[in-house]
Amino acid sequence: MSSCRLYLVSPPHLSAKNFIIPLREALDGGDVASFQLRLKHVDDDAIRRATDMLRPIVQAAGTAFILNDRPDLAAELGCDGVHVGQEDASYADARKLVGPKGIVGVTCHDSRHLAMEAAEAGADYVAFGAFFPTKTKEPKTQADPEILRAWSESTVVPCVAIGGITVQNAPILIEAGADFLAVAAGVWEHPDGPEAAVKAFNNLF
């Protein structure tokens, strides 16, 4: 079975200054493979300010800093990579902007076909979901854990599971072969705080 790692996703709304403490706490909880800054409905300068404030903290912890949706800003701001959805920049455009060394991940919902296309194009990972109900965003699809099993048995490109993941419901996704669990509310809204949440996830892995 592949070893699974944590992929943190920022809350959908945040003040970068107020988020520094919970972010540091989460990173103190143990191994975090990557952190995705996912800010919708804010202007580019707000994304720039948040990235400039949070990226050094994330990278100092040895964690990759991924920007959601915006390969242009990811390249401009020294991010480690970008995550694009099906309605965002194309994989090819994202790769051109972040270069050969940048990480490019692609949302594939519940579709192995979309995932195969992304993997063949050169994506560094594909993301499947949503696996569970989530308040973070309105999921377009409901994915079955079997898609993780089928994917991990047939291809080497890592897969990320996303959508409503908590410490309680994560084991089924780990067992099915997810390489990464992308978690937002399951860490930031954990009753014992972000550090305890990250520790609990790492105990599962």
Image (cartoon, rainbow, N blue to C red):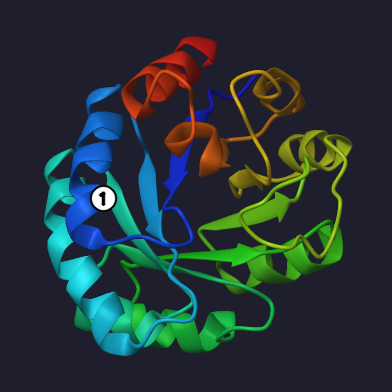
Residue visible at 81% across and 65% down in the picture? 140
Q: Return the residue at label 1.
A: 19
Residue visible at 63% across and 46% down in the picture? 159
Count of marks, rendered view? 1
Residue 205: give x, y in percent of width and height: 52, 16
Q: In this rendering, is residue 89 above or below 164?
A: below
- Graded by Cα atoms within 10 Å as few (under 14), some (14 to 19) or many (20 or more), the crowding at tag 1 reads some
Q: From this viewpoint, is residue 13 visible? A: yes
Residue 79: give x, y in percent of width and height: 25, 67
Residue visible at 37% across and 29% down in the picture? 194
- Look at label 1 and name its amino acid: Phe
Per the image, label 1 sits on a secondary structure element best described as helix
Please tell me in which quadrant of the rendered image residue 99 appears: bottom left
Q: From this viewpoint, is residue 78 visible? A: no
* Quadrant (top left/top right/bottom left/bottom right) for the N terminus: top right
Please tell me in which quadrant of the rendered image residue 174 appears: top right
Q: In this rendering, is residue 99 above or below 15?
A: below
Residue visible at 61% across and 28% down in the picture? 166
Q: Which residue lies furthest to the top in this view?
A: 203
Residue 1 lies left or right of residue 19; in this view the side is right
Please tell me in which quadrant of the rendered image residue 82 appears: bottom left
